[in-house]
Amino acid sequence: MATWADRVAVGDASGHVAMFRDAQLVDRRRLSSTSITAMAFSVMPLGNWEVAAASGNVLTLFAGAVRPRLQIRFDRTISGVACADHRLYVTVVDSPVITVVANGEKVGEIVAGSPITALCGGPVAPGMNLAVACRDGSLYAVKGDGEQAKVGEVDLPVTAVSAACGRAVACIGHFNGVKVAVDGKVVDPEPGADEWAHCLHAAGPAIAWATYDDEICLRRVALPDMDIGMAVS
């Protein structure tokens, strides 16, 4: 699934992508004979947008109800897609390389310290709008020019990340609950959590995640210098 403004795009195991606007279905099409495994809205400098949908080793770009604009092939299965600073960042399985895509073309690469397991777009540190998690549990804020800053480490594999509080990285993975990395420290918004999470989304100080026992959790996380408290729903 991918979201932007009032639009939502959802991919499924049959290779279909459904587009919603204001909670209304506006388009549905089949892009592949295999599962859609990663998606992102690509927002361009003038405000135009298109959807990037990954299936296998192919990234398809399209907008609205028009035919797919183009397809970009990679040498391995695509594991993640994110948009930041009007560019797409694409990862493949078992690789430390992020491929940068602009105007429908591969324009560069960024290399992390170990294979990348998750990434997302959003403000995660001053001037840095891309969050990256590695197999060794390291979390980084990344600039489009390749500059990287380590924001924390959870010592276990991470499966999903989300930008939180405008300057932090929330993550889930092979550990209970959710963790938030900021300024080199890791904050635990729910000490004592006893279930792994499989889905995560953060918006400002609010973080939501779903556990494998069908529980949905919503918390407000307080960073070291933020006096916003912590509410449990």
Image (spheres, rainbow, N blue to C red):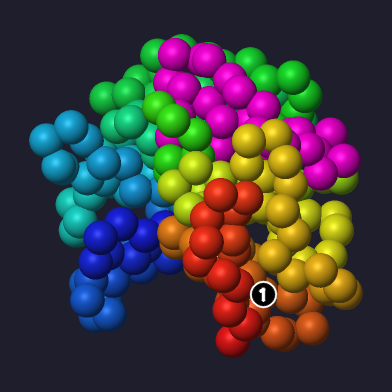
Magenta segment, prevailing SS (helix, strand or loop): strand
Residue 92 image position (x, y, % from top left): 64, 32
Secondary structure beneath label 1: strand
What residue appears at the point 58 percent right and 79 percent down from the top-left corner? Answer: 231
Where 40 sits versus 91, above or below? Answer: below
Where 44 sits versus 37, above or below? Answer: above
What residue appears at the point 74 percent right and 19 percent down from the top-left corner? Answer: 113
Q: Is residue 11 found inside the magenta-colored segment of the image?
A: no
Residue 125 image position (x, y, % from top left): 49, 34
Where 109 sits versus 58, above or below? Answer: above
Residue 10 image position (x, y, % from top left): 43, 65
Picture quadrant where residue 174 is located: bottom right
Image-based side of 124 in relation to 137, left or right: left
What residue appears at the point 30 percent right and 57 percent down from the top-left corner? Answer: 4
Per the rendered image, the range of residues in magenta is 128-155
| Residue 9 in view of the camera | yes
Image-based side of 9 in relation to 103, left or right: right
Q: What's the residue type where badge 1 is placed?
A: Ala
Q: Could you tell me which quadrant the C terminus lies in?
A: bottom right
Q: Which residue is mark 1?
A: 210
Q: Is residue 145 found inside the magenta-colored segment of the image?
A: yes
Picture quadrant where residue 149 is located: top right
- Pointer 1: residues within 10 angstroms few (<14), some, or many (20+)? some
Image-based side of 159 in relation to 90, left or right: right
The front one of 55 and 189 is: 189
